[in-house]
Amino acid sequence: MVMRILHTADLHLGHSLNGWDREAEHCTWFDNLAEIVVQEEIDLVLVAGDIYDNTNPSGEIQQLFYHGLTEMKRRRPGLKIVISGGNHDPARRLEAPRTLMAPLDMHVVGAVHRIRVSETGELVIDIDKHLVPIMKDGQVACHVLSIPFLRASDLPGLNFGDDENHEIKSPVVRAATRFFEEITQAALVRIGKTAPGTPLIATSHLHCAGGAESEGAERRIMIGGSHALPPEVFPGAISYVALGHLHQPQTLGGGRVRYCGSCFPLSSSEISYNHGVTIVEIQDEKVKHRHISIPRPAPVLRLPRGGSAPAALELEELEPELIWLKEEMPWDEDTPMGLRPLVYLEMKATDAASVIMTNAAGIVKAHGLRLAGIRVRREALPGEKAVATTVVKSLRDTIPETLFAESYIRKNGIAPEERHLAAFREASQLTE
């Protein structure tokens, strides 16, 4: 018997770029996902956190998510779905429809659940809320241990006191290791009683040490001040760990720990990523996985283009770049605005930054494109790096007009004109 699993994460429904919502892109992405589910004969879909972009998703965004799930089930009725919460997700709201979803073979875990042992009064993990047996052909094919994003309160015994003699220096790593050992052991006990020998698949949402993160897209999720956990926190009894949080597809832990990546670029740093999903296959208790690319619903790119192009554009160079873009990218005037290219611009500071940004935004809008972001920068003058910076020791050593000029250059990328200096002097006189 072969079990086929689709691992996805970091949908970030409700995300926007520079005021442009991504709803149309997400709708197209869900259509592509449903197509993969059918083509690959998927038995199980794992969603490893960050379904939503914020903890207060609108009704329309939640409806988009449930419509996507329903479409996958409609096209492949026997499909099972397990959803785990991420750091962006509203844990309890995510779980609210769980009793309605369970009969549809959709299981959701937004938070860590514990129960109190009546005999001892001890709080232990409620393994029935986290462990999901996955059936195929009338028998249990595997178990999914659904673990959401962990907060400090989920790690009993977390102690930040000094313990220099301990083998593991980080108290967070120690506490997380204990947690994963506890929940895995509880899962193995339950599996041994019901379906011994079946593979154990886990989901989680965290930053694993050694993983490459995306600048500007992923929040640094901190558990008690710690940032990343080593892949070794996941016990060896787990055959595959489906992770979310880092947006670049990547494999850690010798191939057993996997980030599938985000659904499409959520920031300029993700433009080069090969976005898609991970297909996991289980056969004869052996687990292997592969990446499947998903076409971007809308192009996301940076101008100027790479290669021999300049590092930044002057304003008069922007129009030819946009004309080229319209010739190369698959869109026309009938393409909905939500599916037109998103463009990041790098502009030269030939004028005040505010002037450059306003003019560039107007040109992009006139071409019917979406401006995702713009950065105006001043190119270093010859020998500028060699100039030593004067160290100011006190305010008595400064000249206000010089400080203003330096601040203006940092913000706008060019030196202030005489009219700017005159306005500063006038304002200074009013405050004396």
Image (tube, rainbow, N blue to C red):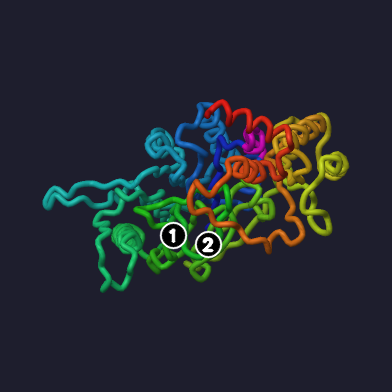
**Mark 2 nearby-residue class (10 Å; few <14, some 14–19, many ≥20):** many
> Which span is picked out in magenta?
17-28
The answer to whether residue 403 is left or right of residue 298 is left
Residue 211's disc is 2
Report which quarter residue 197 is drawn in: bottom left
Residue 228's disc is 1
Q: Residue type at mark 2?
A: Gly
The residue at the point 56 percent across, 43 percent down is 11
- Is 26 magenta? The answer is yes
**Does the CB distance between marks 2 and 1 fall below 8 Å?**
yes
SS under mark 1: loop
Q: Is residue 179 visible?
A: yes
Report which quarter residue 179 is drawn in: bottom left
The answer to whether residue 18 is left or right of residue 103 is right
* Of residues 381 and 6, the one drawn nearer to the viewer in this rendering: 381
User: On screen, 301 above or below 232?
Assistant: above
